[in-house]
Image (tube, helix red, strand yellow):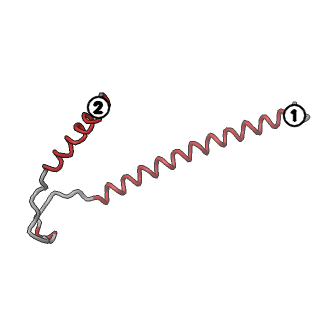
Amino acid sequence: MKKIAYILATLAVLALPCERVSAWQPPAAQDGFVPVEQLGNQEQLPAAPLVAGAYGVAWAAILFYVWTIWRRLARIERELADVARRVAPGGR
């Protein structure tokens, strides 16, 4: 009996949002096709400078990351050469 009550309560809770969604009415549609030129002046933000800036920042970050890896790799290569020189016979 508890299982049936639990299932019914779950179904009732799940059905509530569905009824609210079905009662929602979309806004009234336009009469037909309206060309962009007839829509009037709207505030527009030019995208080209923003896109160029975003690409510039992304490339700068990538180049900085590659530069730091290059420096660390060069330092590790110097340390390995030093260790190899120390370990080699006659290097002491």
Q: Quadrant of residue 45?
A: bottom left
Q: For the residue carrying disc 1, how many other residues have a C-alpha within 10 Å: few (<14), some (14-19), or many (20+)?
A: few
Q: For the residue carrying disc 2, how many other residues have a C-alpha within 10 Å: few (<14), some (14-19), or many (20+)?
A: few
Residue of label 2: 6
Residue of label 1: 91
Cα separation, mark 2 vs mark 1, equals 81 Å
Compared across the picture, whether 68 is left or right of 39 comes to right
Give the residue displayed 47% in from the left and 47% down from the top.
61
**Compared with residue 15, is residue 58 higher up or lower down, i.e. above or below?**
below
Give the residue displayed 14% in from the left and 71% down from the top.
33
Q: Nearer the viewer, mark 2 or mark 1?
A: 2
Give the residue displayed 18% in from the left and 48% down from the top.
21
Q: Give percent across and percent down for residue 22.
A: 16, 50
Compared across the picture, whether 10 is left or right of 27 comes to right
Which tag, 2 or 1, sits closer to the chain's start?
2
Give the residue displayed 14% in from the left and 59% down from the top.
42
Q: Give percent across and percent down for residue 40.
A: 10, 65
Q: Amino acid at mark 1?
A: Gly
Of residue 38 and residue 9, the one placed in the foreground of this image is 9
**Compared with residue 52, is residue 13 higher up or lower down, i.e. above or below?**
above
Residue reaching furthest top?
2
Of residue 3 and residue 15, the one placed in the foreground of this image is 3
